[in-house]
Image: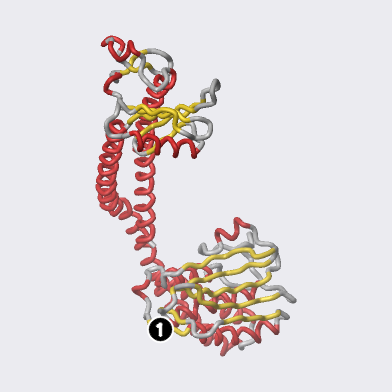
């Protein structure tokens, strides 16, 4: 349990750090990309407004060799003649009317016309082809279309470099943080682990200590019954209560052992199908006597790796629980099937009362009962399902409780199947 708690803490902490880093680095890089797009669109707007070339005064006046922003102010250090661009004008049928490639050496006329054809086919007004940002606009006068391309290679190169560096640094930071969290988690969980170990040790020690006086009480009761007779109500009550306390003590000791995990199990190959059939048959007569319709659908040759005695205990708890709480005229169904790498065992039974969703969350808690008065006519201590959960988890599986319909509950235990 403590190991599982530590793993959850580590995973939660690492995931939280990852999400924060992802949002920060992703936000910064998204902002950088938007700036590249914005810069490219500003240049394309100027080019488009001037027929695909820079205005003459921007080409020659050093004071005006600055790129205006969207609000019309000239505040960018980009110099006009440093910009690389080309443009293509096509008619409404898609034929090329003119091509301008004087301001870029990396693109010839054929390539420029090929790019223009792709843009025209896409029907998009703005976008990227490779490192070239384009702007396509139709002239309402003659229905021709001017497509201007601006080389954003340098800006995109800077963006990609920053993206790569930020990803590498973030990965390194994640590794470092993960190491720190792993080290710190051990110290943070240590007080909880010590407290939990003391609790388990107390339960085990107290259980063994209680067994001795219980044995003496039983022996004294036997002696007393010789004097006053077996039919005496006080003797009968003493026997009943000592038996109940003995069962509770044994259950607590078993629960404590199961929570220690796989180290307490004698692991062998278990034919779960035959074990479940055997246990299901033993409860069939009891169910029929109670007026319950008992059904089973158990696949054959389903094997698991585990402790046979513990698995038998798990099955007994689920079947006993189903028979106890199924009303007369109700239905109990037992199932087993192999699903992927898991052996899925289900026990479904009708219930006398509808079980709330809140109750479902706590069914595997120690001493929890849906009966708020804690007086159950069916007996038990409210610890059986806790033991079932501990047994399942000790085998590396999981157990759940769910409502299939009103007044019907299904317990599903999934154990790792043998290969």
Location of residue 309 with respect to 203 vertically, above or below? below
Q: Is residue 394 above or below residue 20?
A: below
- Quick one: 294 or 224, which is closer to the camera? 294
Q: Which residue is mark 1?
A: 269
- Which residue sits furthest right? 329
- State left or right for residue 34 relative to residue 107: right
- Give residue 390's position: percent from left, percent from top: 45, 69
- The x, y position of residue 20, in whole percent, is 37, 40
Quadrant in which the N terminus appears: bottom left
**Point 54% across, 77% down: residue:** 337
Considering every residue shown, the one lying at the far bottom of the view is 226
Residue at screen point 51% across, 27% down: 144
**Where, quadrant-wise, is the C terminus in this rendering?**
bottom left
Name the element at disc 1.
Answer: strand
Q: Is residue 260 visible?
A: yes
Few, some or many C-alpha atoms within 10 Å of disc 1 (few <14, some 14-19, many ≥20)?
few
Quadrant position of residue 400? bottom right
Residue placed at 41% from the left, 26% from the top? 41
Closest to the observer, 39 or 400: 39
Q: Taking 214 as reference, is 399 above or below it?
A: above
Q: Nearer the viewer, residue 274 or 142?
A: 142
Foreground residue, 196 or 17? 17
* Residue under the point 56% across and 67% down: 382
How has the structure been colored for display?
secondary structure
Q: Is residue 190 above or below residue 409?
A: above
Residue 88 in percent (x, y) is at: 41, 29
125 vs 107, left or right, is: right
């Amino acid at each position: 349990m403590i190991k599982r708690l530590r793993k959850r803490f580590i995973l939660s902490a690492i995931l939280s750090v990852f999400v924060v880093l992802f949002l920060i680095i992703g936000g910064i890089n998204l902002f950088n990309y938007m700036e590249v797009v914005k810069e490219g669109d500003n240049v394309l707007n100027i080019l488009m407004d001037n027929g695909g070339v820079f205005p003459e005064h921007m080409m020659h006046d050093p004071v005006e060799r600055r790129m205006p922003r969207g609000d019309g102010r000239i505040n960018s250090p980009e110099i006009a003649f440093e910009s690389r661009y080309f443009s293509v004008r096509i008619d409404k049928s898609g034929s090329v009317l003119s091509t301008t490639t004087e301001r870029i050496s990396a693109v010839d006329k054929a390539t420029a016309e090929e790019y223009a054809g792709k843009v025209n086919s896409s029907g998009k007004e703005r976008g990227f082809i490779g490192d070239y940002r384009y702007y396509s606009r139709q002239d309402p006068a003659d229905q021709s279309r001017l497509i201007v391309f601006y080389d954003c290679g340098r800006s995109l190169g800077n963006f990609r470099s920053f993206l790569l560096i930020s990803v590498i640094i973030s990965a390194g930071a994640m590794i470092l943080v993960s190491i720190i969290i792993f080290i710190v988690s051990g110290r943070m969980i240590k007080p909880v682990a010590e407290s939990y170990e003391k609790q388990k040790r107390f339960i085990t020690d107290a259980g063994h200590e209680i067994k001795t006086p219980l044995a003496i009480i039983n022996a004294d009761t036997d002696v007393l019954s010789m004097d006053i007779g077996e039919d005496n109500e006080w003797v009968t009550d003493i026997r009943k209560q000592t038996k109940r306390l003995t069962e509770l003590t044994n259950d607590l000791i078993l629960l404590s052992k199961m929570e220690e995990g796989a180290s307490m199990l004698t692991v062998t190959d278990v034919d779960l199908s035959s074990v479940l059939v055997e246990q299901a048959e033993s409860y069939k007569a009891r169910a029929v006597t109670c007026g319950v319709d008992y059904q089973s659908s158990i696949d054959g040759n389903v094997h698991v790796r585990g402790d046979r005695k513990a698995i038998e205990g798990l099955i007994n708890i689920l079947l006993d629980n189903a028979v106890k709480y199924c009303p007369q005229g109700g239905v109990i169904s037992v199932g087993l099937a192999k699903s992927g790498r898991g052996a899925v065992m289900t026990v479904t039974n009708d219930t006398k009362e509808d079980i709330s969703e809140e109750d479902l969350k706590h069914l595997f808690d120690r001493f929890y009962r849906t009966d708020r008065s804690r007086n159950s006519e069916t007996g038990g201590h409210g610890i059986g399902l806790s033991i079932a959960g501990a047994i399942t988890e000790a085998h590396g599986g999981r157990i759940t409780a769910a409502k299939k319909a009103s007044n019907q509950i299904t317990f599903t235990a999934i154990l790792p199947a043998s290969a």
